[in-house]
Image (cartoon, helix red, strand yellow):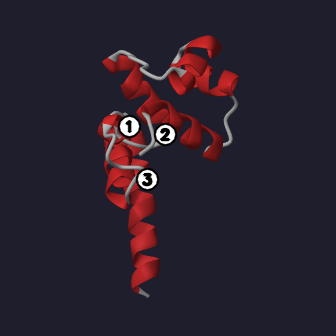
Amino acid sequence: MPTLGEKVRTLRKKAGLTLEQFAEQIGASKSSVWELENKEKARPSADRINEVAKVLGVTPEFLMNDDVAEPSIDVADEAFFRKYQSLDTGVKQQLQEILSVLDKKAGS
């Protein structure tokens, strides 16, 4: 099973992010991201794991679970919902309107 670092590296590359870009998005240094991805027993803080998960579109639980190699649809849905919950009301309303339009098109 993949380690935390292997999961982060795989998901980061899948997202098309360089070490520098990813580090900037999670508020870390390039060297700390390299350590996270390559150190055998990386021990990032809970806050860092949360930021990494948010940027990569997964849950912290997925990243920390050594028994799961690939994120499931449920993991992606939960990560999306967590991100949605942190949005301001105006953005939430816009997303709800978009979803309503898409739902109507799917029902046609």
How far apart are labels 1 and 3 at the CA level? 10 Å
**In the image, 17: left or right of 2?**
right
Read off the residue under disc 3. Answer: 70
Residue type marked 1: Leu
Instruction: State the mark number for residue 75.
Output: none
Q: Secondary structure at mark 2?
A: helix
Read off the residue under disc 1. Answer: 63
Where does the image place residue 105, in percent across and percent down from the top left? 47, 79
Q: Residue shown at 39%/52% (left/top)?
A: 76
Instruction: State the mark number for residue 7.
Output: 2
> Of 7 and 105, which appears nearest the observer?
7
**In the image, 30: left or right of 39?**
right
Residue type marked 2: Lys
- Circle 2 crowding by C-alpha within 10 Å: few under 14, some 14–19, many from 20: many
Measured along the vertical axis of the image, is residue 24 above or below residue 77? Answer: above
Asked if the residue at tag 2 contacts the one at tag 1, i.e. Cβ–Cβ closer than 8 Å, the answer is: yes
Asked if the residue at tag 2 contacts the one at tag 3, i.e. Cβ–Cβ closer than 8 Å, the answer is: no
Chain-order first, disc 3 or disc 2? 2
What is the quadrant of the C terminus in the image? bottom left
Chain-order first, disc 1 or disc 3? 1
Residue type marked 3: Glu
